[in-house]
Image (cartoon, helix red, strand yellow):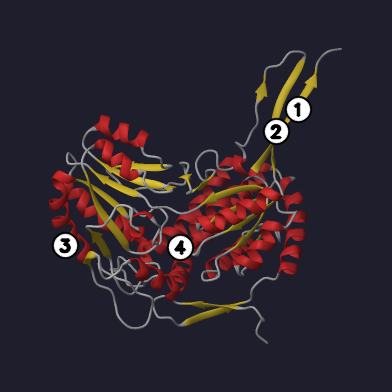
Amino acid sequence: MPHPTAHRVLNPATGEVLDTVPATTPAEVGAAVERAAAAARGWAATAPADRARLLRRFAVIVDGHLEELARLEVREAGHTIGNARWEAGNARDLLDFAAGGVERLSGQQIPVSGGLNVTLLEPLGVVGVIAPWNFPMPIAAWAVAPALAAGNAVILKPAETTPLTALRLAELALAAGLPEHLFQVLPGAGAVTGNALVEHPGVAKIVFTGSTRVGKQIMASCAERVKRVTLELGGKSPNVVFADADVEAAAAAAPMSFLDNAGQDCCARTRILVQQSVYDRFLDLLAPALKSVVVGDPADEKTQMGPLISAVQRDRVRSYVTDDLAVIRGTAPEGPGFWYPPTVVTEVDPAAPIAVEEVFGPVAVVLPFEDEEDAVRLANATEYGLSGSIWTRDVSRAIRVSRAVAAGNLSVNSHSSVRYWTPFGGYKQSGLGRELGPDALTAFTETKNVFISTEA
């Protein structure tokens, strides 16, 4: 008999039903938290070397199932096969990286008079992770891997549309020998399963990636309970091209800076800011580059961009690109699936919704600027501050503008945003806290100060 609140998982490229996954009820969330708390106590007491060994084994098993996980991601999320292989490999690498931090997670000895003072880094207990649908595997692993490494149990709630890779990772964790109930995956709706996880008093921390609107709701709920929270939220990232840059290289790189994952990326460079003196030349170079992007079957090795995740998301994207706008367009398949063509909007008001709001689709605007001061003003003219790029040959300018742009992750002459060994997070409405990097494990610990008197 079907579960009364089961969710259908669709293939975004065809619209066909892949699977039906039962949704977790609030009562089931409560039972899972109790199981996780018991598992966390045993895991925290496990020798660090043994925890590290099991996490490395988990990484090895994920590596052995890389192609399976990638193909599953293609089917449930519509990601291109090349991207999906990178995502599965990123989950593997994060487990391996976190395992290397287990035996290096140490406190401090602080000089004091009359005794010895040390700090201890202790696990929080149960960590709840609410993962998004745009990068289901890697973003889940950003929190799951360091939280486990720090000695916590983890409950992962995947997005309703993309639960399959998360469920498979939980199976692989058990196959690697991780204790039962240490890493649990609870599919379900955010308003039901997610809320139950956020509100449960036995969950010590919530890590959420998603919209700023929902992030604010989660933050408010956590504040009522004085519960720790890390938020990775929206973005409207600038791609600033100065006249002294390699304009040909900047134009060639621009399309995939916002078309990767069909633009469903918080770091997408959807605001292309080009110095007025090279604006026309840049557009002349951008148009053929945009139109050359191969959009199609995500399982095809040659495809560069796949579909949007759902019909709802496609309709949202369409609503921003009104008929009165001047556009440059690529092509996309017609027929079944949730397709939208690569699109660049020109001659638009810098304050228009499409220029300042997160569209979350394969759409960018191109805006001219006069000088460095004007570029910084435009770059900062949104409520977001997650990522961005600066194209210039002038090193001094690169440093000045990097300091002036209010964003957590910037690249110069590059569109790179995320490396698991460097910190990631946003300014302003783009989030709270940092993930990844050398301090990733510390974010899942409590600091305890201990003073030992040496006086007779």
Residue at the image point whose x is 36% and y is 39% from the top: 405
Q: Which residue is mark 4?
A: 134
* Residue at mark 4 to residue at mark 2: CA–CA distance: 36 Å
Q: Earlier in the sequence, mark 1 or mark 2?
A: 2
* Residue at mark 3 to residue at mark 4: CA–CA distance: 27 Å
Q: Nearer the viewer, residue 40 or 103?
A: 40
Q: Which residue is mark 3?
A: 288
Badge nearest the viewer, 3 or 2: 3
Please indicate, yes or no, whether residue 185 appears anywhere in the rendered image. no
CB atoms of marks 1 and 2 within 8 Å: yes
Q: Which residue is mark 2?
A: 120
Check the image and name the residue furthest to the bottom: 1
Q: Earlier in the sequence, mark 4 or mark 1?
A: 4
* Residue at mark 1 to residue at mark 2: CA–CA distance: 8 Å
Left or right, residue 327 beside residue 65? left
In the displayed structure, 169 sits above or below 236; it is: below
Q: Earlier in the sequence, mark 3 or mark 1?
A: 3
Q: Which residue is mark 1?
A: 450
Left or right, residue 316 beside residue 54? left
Please indicate, yes or no, whether residue 36 appears anywhere in the rendered image. yes
Question: Hey, what amino acid is under mark 4?
Answer: Asn
Image disc number at residue 228 = none
